[in-house]
Image (cartoon, coloured by chain):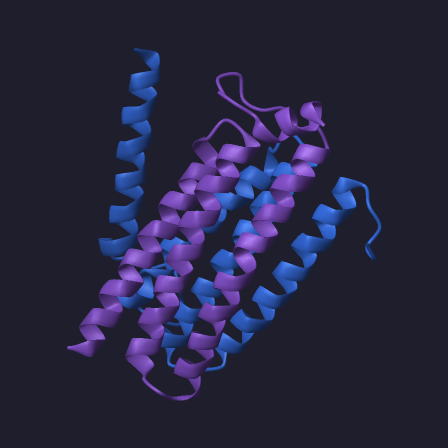
Amino acid sequence: MINTIGIVLIGIGIFFDLFGTLGLIRFPDLYNRLQASTKCVTFGTGSILFGVFLISGFSATGIKALFTIVFIVLTAPVSAHALAKSAHEADIKLWDKSVCDKLKEDEIKE
Amino acid sequence: MKKRLMWIFGAVGLLVVLYLILFYPFQILIYENLQFIPLLKRVVFILLLSALFCLFRIMRGPTALDRIVAVDILGILIVGLCAVLAISTGRGWYIDIGIAWALQSFIGTIALSKYMEGRDFDD
């Protein structure tokens, strides 16, 4: 029973990874690509690791999988935020149909 | 009209590739007959397909930051690949490679983004 739940979680995670990287190809802009692929791939990898933990139980592999989940959930948003900030500082242009740019408005106001 | 045709072509191509990965009896690998291995070992090739998408974005990103984004996503993806390999082959040390890869990918992405921003590493 618990093996089945783990394999279903691994399948969900793999399809989230696939569609996240499909967004990495298809989207028109750096910021769109960043927000699509970072969220999808982080959730997908977390789901895969939780499935591995459910299958292997409280052995060495399972505990390491839990620690890797905590590490990835802590570090992936930090690196994505640093990348977006540095792209905005390096004057990468937004897409033509983007609606608003709050950070640039704040810099103009100050 | 042409755009919709491209969408249909891409979706059908993706479904055909997924079908071939999951159910086609390949005879490519020499040391192991892939027709008889369970589905969990074939699922690794879907992760390799998405890693191929990341390599495509690394090949033709317009700027350097696009390539850095693709490398970051590839690093998180490889951790999942190592976890699936640890289950499907029964060798538990694959997940150690995953932990080390996640650490290296995080530090490398932070360093590259600070460098592209034009600052030193110590502020």
Residue drawn at 48 percent across, 50 percent down: B51
Q: Which chain does purple denote in the image?
A: A
| Residue farthest left in this picture | A1
The correct choice, above or below, for B120 with respect to A35 in the image is below
Can you give x and y, in whole percent of width and height, for residue A70 in the image? 47, 70
The residue furthest bottom is A59
Chain that the image shows in blue: B
Residue A32 horizontal side relative to residue B121, left or right: left
Q: In which quarter of the image is the C terminus of chain B?
A: bottom right
Quadrant for the N terminus of chain B, please.
Answer: top left
**Farthest top residue?**
B1
Q: Nearer the viewer, residue B31 or B67?
A: B67
Q: Which of B20 and A104 is in front in this view?
A: A104
The structure residue drawn at horizontal position 31% and vertical position 51%, both measured from the top left corner, is A15
In the image, residue B51 above or below residue B65: below
Which residue sits at x=48%, y=62%?
Answer: A73
In the foreground, A103 or B67:
A103
Where residue A27 sits in the image (x, y, percent)? 46, 30
Residue depicted at 40% across the width and 49% down the height:
A40
Q: Is residue B109 visible?
A: yes
Q: Which of A46 and B59 is in front in this view?
A: A46
Residue A56, compared with residue A33, is above or below; it is: below
Observer able to see residue B49: no
- Please provide percent x and percent y for residue B71: 60, 49
Q: Position of residue A5 (x, y in %)?
A: 21, 70
Q: How many labels does the image show?
A: 0
Q: Is residue A4 left or right of residue B110?
A: left
Up-down relation of residue A20 to residue B23 (above or below): above
